[in-house]
Image (cartoon, rainbow, N blue to C red):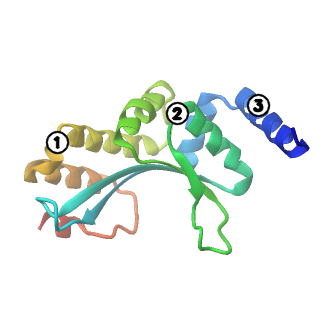
């Protein structure tokens, strides 16, 4: 084994031995995002797609923490956060698969709770996933419930579509 591979293996083992699940939960409190977004889709009955993703980002020196969290969850993938940027070299862990979101990510935070306002984001995220699972997002009423819930969060973001546009 080359010395670089041996060093990488040693670093991975050190991470596994030192990083608790509580630490990972706290890491998400600071750097995570439970994203619910909307995309215009003319081929869908209500003309809107609901996007649900979990993102966790970190600078290159912390990439090993993202890898460990992905390993413990048993899902997700890593990619450069802004691959076209010469300045931003951060990495992001992304979980998109709704089954993994429901069966792996959500249970992790039930067992290792968040402690910041991310609890509100997670609650909204979980609500949206539950309506999608029941196919209620395909109805006007279910879609409206999702939009209302997402926009009740006072967090300031650059939302692409306003609540009014989504509900018109």
Sequence-wise, the earlier of marks 2 and 3 is 3
Q: In which quadrant will I find the N terminus?
A: top right
- Could you say which is closer to the camera, residue 47 or residue 57? 47
Q: Secondary structure at mark 3?
A: helix
Residue 11 spot, x, y in % from top left? 80, 38
* Spatial CA span between label 2 and label 3: 17 Å
Residue at the image position 55 percent from the left and 36 percent from the top? 25
Which residue is under mark 1? 135
Residue 94 bears which disc, if any? none
Q: Secondary structure at mark 1?
A: loop
2 relative position to 22: left or right: right
Above-or-below relation of 143 to 11: below
Which residue is under mark 3? 13
Residue 160 spot, x, y in % from top left? 33, 70
Above-or-below relation of 97 to 166: above
Above-or-below relation of 164 to 25: below
Residue at the image position 78 percent from the left and 32 percent from the top? 14
Looking at this rendering, what residue extends furthest in the right direction?
A: 3
Which residue is under mark 2? 73
For label 1, count other residues whose C-alpha is less than 10 Å away and answer few (under 14), some (14-19) or many (20+).
Answer: few
Sequence-wise, the earlier of marks 2 and 1 is 2
Residue 80 spot, x, y in % from top left? 60, 60
134 relative position to 103: left or right: left
For label 2, count other residues whose C-alpha is less than 10 Å away and answer few (under 14), some (14-19) or many (20+).
Answer: some
């Amino acid at each position: 084994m080359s010395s670089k591979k041996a060093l990488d293996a040693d670093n991975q083992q050190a991470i596994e031995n030192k990083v608790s699940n509580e630490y990972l939960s706290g890491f998400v409190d600071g750097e995570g995002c439970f994203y619910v977004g909307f995309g215009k889709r003319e081929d869908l009955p209500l003309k809107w797609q609901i996007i649900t993703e979990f993102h966790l980002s970190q600078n290159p020196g912390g990439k090993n923490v993202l890898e460990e969290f992905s390993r413990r969850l048993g899902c997700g993938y890593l990619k450069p956060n802004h691959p076209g940027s010469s300045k931003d070299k951060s990495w992001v862990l992304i979980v998109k698969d709704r089954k993994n979101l429901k069966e792996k990510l959500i249970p992790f935070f039930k067992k290792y709770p968040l402690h910041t306002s991310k609890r509100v984001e997670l609650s909204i995220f979980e609500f949206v996933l539950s309506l999608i699972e029941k196919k209620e997002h395909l109805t006007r009423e279910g879609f409206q419930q999702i939009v209302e819930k997402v926009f009740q969060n006072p967090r300031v973001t650059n939302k692409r579509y306003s609540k009014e546009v989504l509900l018109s």
